[in-house]
Image (tube, grey):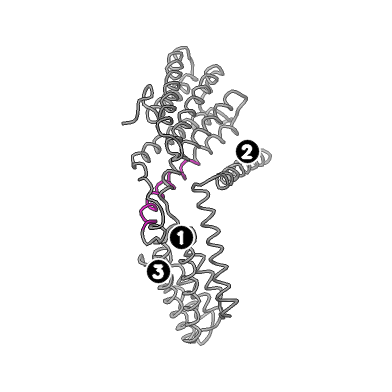
Amino acid sequence: MTVREQLRVGWRWLGWEAAAVGRTVRYAIRGTGPERDTMVQALKMAGAAIAAWALAGWWLKAPLALMAPWTALALVDATVYRSLRSGLQQISVIVVGAVWASLAMALAGGSTLGAMIIALPVLALVGTYRRFGAQGIYGSTTALFVITYGAYSLTEVGHRLLETCIGAVIGISVNAFVFPPIHLRSVYDQLQRLPRDSADLLRHMADGLREEWGSAEAEEWRDRARRLQPILRSLADARQWTNESLRLNPAWNLRRRSPQPPPESEDTRWHDITEHLTVISRTLARTTGEDSDLARPAPAFLDRYAVLAERTAEVCAAEAGLFDQDEDEKSARERRKQAAQDAWRYYDSLADAFGQETGPAAAVSGELLVETRQLLSVLAPHHGREPQ
């Protein structure tokens, strides 16, 4: 690949990233959802850190006030329960780090290098203790603060612990009492996002297939298909957070009980759907470029396949309505049933005409049809029957 081609690919990649960021920003601003929740949590982290610094550094004039906002920032977690658990873990490991670093400074006679040689190997090993979880690294970083600051008397170690406790209390309090995270809606949000983004991918693919397209367009479709995988991981996290977010959460008794999230079988179902979309986009990508090992189907077939992709996108869009708690469920189901019937009807028509395909391109056309059939079989059983 020449330098010019590399630059062109890099520029397109930046365009895809910018478009993805733009979609995330629009979702965060437009309404409730995981993007809005992420934005709120990020602002809470910043607010907790500022408040901790204001108390420890500006008001109390703590000698190493950095410890307070640093701790507060880390403890605004996905759930109140995780904040409390992480707080206890972090305070424990910071106590170990501060005490051991002070002892190392005393043994090394105040030598920074000598204290690091004594303290860091031990604390790095202690940090791997599973009871400390992800907070284990803070033992080593606390030791670095203590050693490089050069303060290791008992009084000064006490200041480090006080600064840490201030940050922990502020971080946990902000997470618990300022828009406390409740993830009952998150499962619905992720299950709505999967069909919505799948519909966007299929529509984008349909528009491209009707025009001149090459490796750059095909790689963009593959990129969009790959971006469905993080949503599946977010869905799995949302399942776990749904249970955790109700534990030790003061907002639980202050809100109306929400309906239970959809069953976990929906997660498996959408995992299969995204796999079929990934295979379809990969098959199209392998028909482009100088090193392509597959023959591209005839333009007439691709034009008809573009229509099938559009019909399938309508099924996905209708599916998204089922997970929208503000939409009437009966009308959403009727819309999905009608879209499924249209998609299957057009698929049958295209499959009947497949016998006219000849040559190496017929194999690719057949693979696209097989994957689309499997996609529709999972997404919408034949003629719009409801999933069992």
Helix, strand or loop at disc 1?
loop
Measured as percent of width and height from the top left, residue 275 is found at 42, 35
- In the rendered image, the vertical position of residue 99 relative to residue 206, given as above or below: below
- At x 47%, y 30%, the residue is 280
Give residue 2's quadrant in the image.
Answer: top right
Residue density around tag 1, few if under 14, some if 14–19, many if 20 or more, within 10 Å: many
Crowding near pointer 2: few (<14 within 10 Å), some, many (20+)?
few
- Going by the numbered disc 2, the residue's amino acid type is Met
Tell me if mark 3 has few (under 14), some (14-19) or many (20+) residues whose alpha carbon lies within 10 angstroms of its own: some
Q: Secondary structure at mark 3?
A: helix
Between 39 and 98, the one nearer to me in the picture? 39
Magenta highlight range: 227-246
How many marks overall?
Answer: 3
Identify the residue at horizontal 36%, vertical 41% (top origin): 262
Please name the residue that numbered disc 2 is placed on: 1
**What residue is disc 3 on?**
89
Q: CA distance from mark 3 to mark 1?
A: 13 Å
Q: Position of residue 213 (x, y in %)?
A: 60, 27
